[in-house]
Amino acid sequence: MASFRLKIGTRIGVVSDTHGLLRPEVEETLRGVPVILHAGDVGHVDVLRGLNAIAPTVAVRGNVDRGDFGATLPMNECVEIGKRTIYLYHVREDLDIDPVAEEVDLVITGHSHQPALDEIDGVTYLNPGSCGPHRFSLPVALAFLTVTKEGFDIEQVDLDVT
């Protein structure tokens, strides 16, 4: 489990589905965050190198992360920030744990490319959307988590890209 001690008010970057493309707009938007969480479909080691140049990045394997590179990424990752537990996994419908039973506060997934935020049985589910290549008519998007006394505030961001 990755663990980060962050001050109240700290913003964390959350991305998914880069598919081998680290857009300059994504790099600029994430600049200054202390941690980045990537919910899979990284697509290429250069994306992780670029994100890690901005901040330490925790990433999980998505369905396009195959071969030698994919084998370097875990299928899931548990991240502790303060007293809150975040679970990273690529496909929400295939979730490999019961978040309620495991006392997870936030589940971050990707795969659908569709930004989403909801709460079920006290667990928050976040899909930051895709910040890689355009797909269908979906926005290029990412999210920020801000650490609060109560847990997290989540801000979803649609990027203005051409």
Image (cartoon, rainbow, N blue to C red):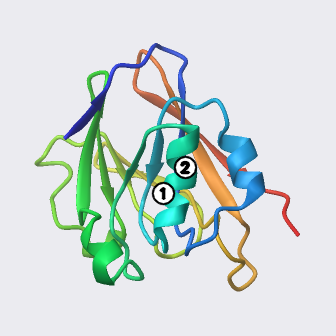
Does residue 86 lie above or below 44 as drawn? above
- Please state which amino acid type lies under the numbered disc 1: Leu
Q: Quadrant of residue 135?
A: bottom right
Mark 1 highlights which residue? Answer: 48
Residue 60 spot, x, y in % from top left? 33, 61
Q: In the orientation shown, which residue stands out farthest toward the right?
A: 162
Q: Residue at x 60, y 47 (%)?
A: 143
Where is the C terminus found, in terms of image quarters?
bottom right
Evaluate whether residue 158 shows in this view. Answer: no
24 and 75: which is toward the camera: 24
- Please state which amino acid type lies under the numbered disc 2: Leu
Mark 2 highlights which residue? Answer: 51
Q: Residue at x 19, y 41 (%)?
A: 1
Residue 154 spot, x, y in % from top left? 55, 39
Q: In the orientation shown, which residue stands out farthest toward the left?
A: 101
Disc 2 to disc 1, how far (Cα)? Answer: 5 Å
Classify mark 1: helix, strand or loop.
helix
Does residue 5 lie above or below 74 as drawn? above
Query: What number of labels is visible?
Result: 2
Classify mark 2: helix, strand or loop.
helix
Q: Quadrant of residue 40?
A: bottom left
Residue 156 spot, x, y in % from top left? 64, 48
Evaluate whether residue 62 shows in this view. Answer: yes
154 and 15: which is toward the camera: 15
Left or right placement of residue 49 versus residue 141 in this view: left
Q: Residue at x 25, y 73 (%)?
A: 71
- Do callouts 2 and 1 mark residues in contact (Cβ within 8 Å)? yes
Residue 126 spot, x, y in % from top left? 47, 53
